[in-house]
Amino acid sequence: MKITKFKSLLVFLCLTWIVSDLFAQKGYQLGFVHYNTDRKNSSSNNLFLTNGIQGGVTYDIKLRNLIYLHTAGLLSVTYNSYKVGYNYRYNSMEIAISFPLQIKFVLPQTPNFDAFVFTGPTIKGSFARFGQMINTDLNQANPFTYVDEPFISRFTVFYGVGIGFKYKSIYIQGNYDWGIINPYKGFNSESFNIAIGKVL
């Protein structure tokens, strides 16, 4: 059942990308991304705080005047570190790809300057994680190794809102997303990122 759902999702994303490549305004962006995954109903037990970079190609399909369907393929590399017991620290690095499907509303200001807002879901798929254990007392660190089974589910679905500003072909934007389908049972996921990009 899970394989069938995954194949359906993959087909849908591929079709979206084909349509985007034919009819959309293309661009690329690079920025900072932060993920926070914490236990529900416990603000003091934040177990996964990750920071990193995210970048990729973007597509904007015009739906009507000043309204666009925004999608992208964004690769992210994030890193986190937390204590395990009194004298150990665990570091991890995660590689993931995200596919936003958002509605963007352009608020025209001048011929060269626009502001825009956007909202919609983002699907994040994590496909690799590497871990490292460090003995802080002895200052000994194991090498980073691939973690074979890091997730209950490799997919997170976020819903978020954002705002941005564009001058000529250069833009900067920021958005905040809330996890509506989380990879860990009993946890909430949130995401924040800020990026700079260029429309081709």
Image (cartoon, rainbow, N blue to C red):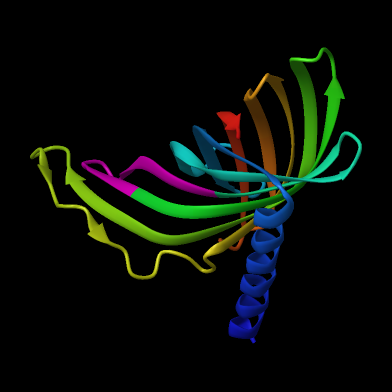
**Residue 14 in the image, given as x and y percentages of width and height:** 63, 67
Toward the viewer: 199 or 196?
Answer: 199
Q: Is residue 79 magenta?
A: yes
Toward the viewer: 149 or 140?
Answer: 149
Residue extending farthest to the top is: 110
**Residue 138 located left or right of residue 91:** left
Q: Which residues are magenta?
A: 74-92
Residue at 12%, 37% (x, y): give it.
137
**Residue 33 located left or right of residue 174:** left
Q: How many marks?
A: 0
Residue at 41%, 64% (x, y): give it.
150
Q: Is residue 195 visible?
A: no
Q: Is residue 5 magenta?
A: no
**Residue 176 in the image, given as x and y percentages of width and height:** 68, 35
**Residue 166 located left or right of residue 133:** right
**Residue 16 in the image, given as x and y percentages of width and height:** 70, 62
Is residue 46 shown above or below 73? above
Toward the viewer: 84 or 100?
Answer: 100
> Magenta part mainly helix, strand or loop?
strand
Q: Is residue 49 visible?
A: yes
Residue at 71%, 48% (x, y): give it.
24
**Residue 19 in the image, given as x and y percentages of width and height:** 71, 60
Quadrant of the rendered image containing residue 79: top left
Quadrant of the rendered image containing residue 168: top right
Is residue 92 shown above or below 149? above
For the C terminus, give its image quadrant. Answer: top right
Is residue 175 shown above or below 100? above
For the N terminus, give its image quadrant. Answer: bottom right
